[in-house]
Amino acid sequence: MASTTSEPQPTGIQPTISLEAAVDLLVASLSCPLTTPSCANLMCVAARRISRAFHSRETSSPAQVKFSKSLPRLLRATISFITCKRTYKLHSDMVLRLASCRCTQNQSPEAVARIMRLHAEGPSVEDDPQAELLKKVHEVGYLREMVTHLIPLVKQSISSLTGHKFRSPVPGKDERDQPWPLSAEDLLPHGLPDSIEGLEMWSDARTGTSAIFGLVRELAMHHRPFALALLRPPEYTLAIDRPLEHLTAAMDFYDAHSASDPEVSRQPEFQLVLALVFQFFYVLRLPDPSNTFEPMLVAKVDEMAPVLERLSAILSSLLDNPSALRQEDEWNWSQMLLNIQALIYGRNGRVAPPEVRRQTDKLMQKMMDPVRDALSEMAEVRKGHCANMRCPRRADLDIVYSGRCANCNIMRYCGKECQKKAWNAPILPHKKVCNQIHEFKRSLSKETWAALWSDGGNVYWLMPRSLRTEDGKPVDAQLLKEINKSLVKFKAMCGVYDHGIAKGLADANLMALLKAEEADMDIRIMEMFP
């Protein structure tokens, strides 16, 4: 039997299946999808039961983490099911098999009645000449919904880990009940290439779910080898092709409903899909020592441009009426527009038209906020790697865990030697920005500081004026502006260093390049942050 934490029971709801039974059913079915007697409908009902228990706890609360961690068998079965490599035919055969309900075969009337109470009631199609086909379509929808319900549990378990670290085994526990994940092999049991191909199947816009991009994002942020494997040429199916399919489907939904529904831009079929895809794109753009992101864009920009230009027109039309937008929506659409322009222009001879450049300048000026910008930069660096630019293991794809500096709690170092060298480094010494961040951290309560780096911190990034010091005063915007400048410069200089290493520059030549670039960077920083 599965072990679960006690569940708060919502009043007025009588569950059709117990939480423990739902977990057991899914573990068995996901582990053997080609032989399980359960159908997609029944599996979806079980997933809904677990999802309700998960979401009955406060968002991003320790209770949600505790709940997801209490289900290691389910987590392992889910990640194995979603990342299992199958040919298109085998995947289709599996989906069709699960979409065919056999739950009542060879059962007594009493058993049939009991079993059917555990099935969701779909739309009536009995009078339709294509009834059987429509039933299959609905069952495939149940399978997609099941995957969508289970992904948040996997994401929560991964996001609660420190980057590149895994859980410690518990002596005496059954191997299946050990905390998940214990290792890279436990995180992705089918290995990197096969896991990516498995995820590609579930990211298909026709039969899959956009929630996959949220899972892939979490995996990429936690496990750098996975992120780099996503960017390997030549197809870039999961990195580019699948997101474009989902964006196209979201825009088709918008166009089909925009005339009749003034709130269509807030519907999950549009807003949530866009958010998941662009959050995924953002992770792919994180500093990459192997310099694979830019070549990918060069290879795919001609395919990306028509889709993103169509989306740009929709977002621009939404922003033309700011009074009808919530502040959060206005910021999100504006950020997406800027991301679109950064993705498609400046490559393969593509030059932004004058009106696009004017729009970009206007958006950037409007969106500038020293608090939000600094928080965003700190969040990115906090999830990064060793901040010693000259770390000997910097370009090593075998991930080395880097702990956070005890003083600033933001910058990471793989060991005392790297931290010592970075403290008074000739280029971008850690001492300055460390003291700046420490001063900011001391002004906040411990609870507020912790909230900044969880999902709950989004409220401060979207509405930065709500962020207050421990004594209730506005935070020091000038201090945060200086932190932002330091971190922007740090990222840019790391890119210069990595590019020099990739070109095989000798150390003396590399340092000369960095010093020259630093002088130019100081001028550009002053122009960016007057």
Image (cartoon, rainbow, N blue to C red):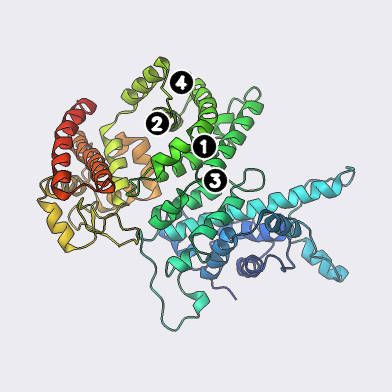
Specify which label sits upstream in the sequence, 3 or 1.
3
Q: Name the residue under label 4.
A: 323
Q: Could one spot residue 99 in this view of the protein?
A: yes
Q: Residue at x 50, y 80 (%)?
A: 174
Foreground residue, 17 or 418?
Answer: 418
Q: Name the residue under label 1.
A: 274
* Residue in the picture at 35% in, 49% down: 290
Amino acid type, label 2: Ala
Q: Nearer the viewer, mark 3 or mark 1?
A: 3
Height in image: 445 above or below 180?
above
- Residue 528 percent across, percent down from the top left: 24, 27
Residue on which the image places disc 3: 237
* Horizontal side, residue 231 vs residue 503: left or right: right
Q: Callout 1, which amino acid?
A: Leu
Closer to viewer: mark 4 or mark 1: 1
Please tell me which of labels 4 and 3 falls first in the chain: 3
Residue at position x 43%, y 25% from top?
350
The answer to whether 200 is drawn above or below residue 272 in the figure is: below
Q: Relative to residue 115, is residue 135 depicted above or below?
A: above
Q: Mark 2 points at which residue?
A: 342
Query: For this rendering, which residue is in front, 54 or 341?
Result: 341
Q: Is mark 1 on a helix, strand or loop?
A: helix
Q: How crowded is mark 3: few (under 14 residues within 10 Å), some or many (20 or more)?
A: some
* Left or right position of 299 against 264: left
Where does residue 431 sit, x and y in percent of width and height? 12, 49
The residue under label 3 is which amino acid type?
Thr
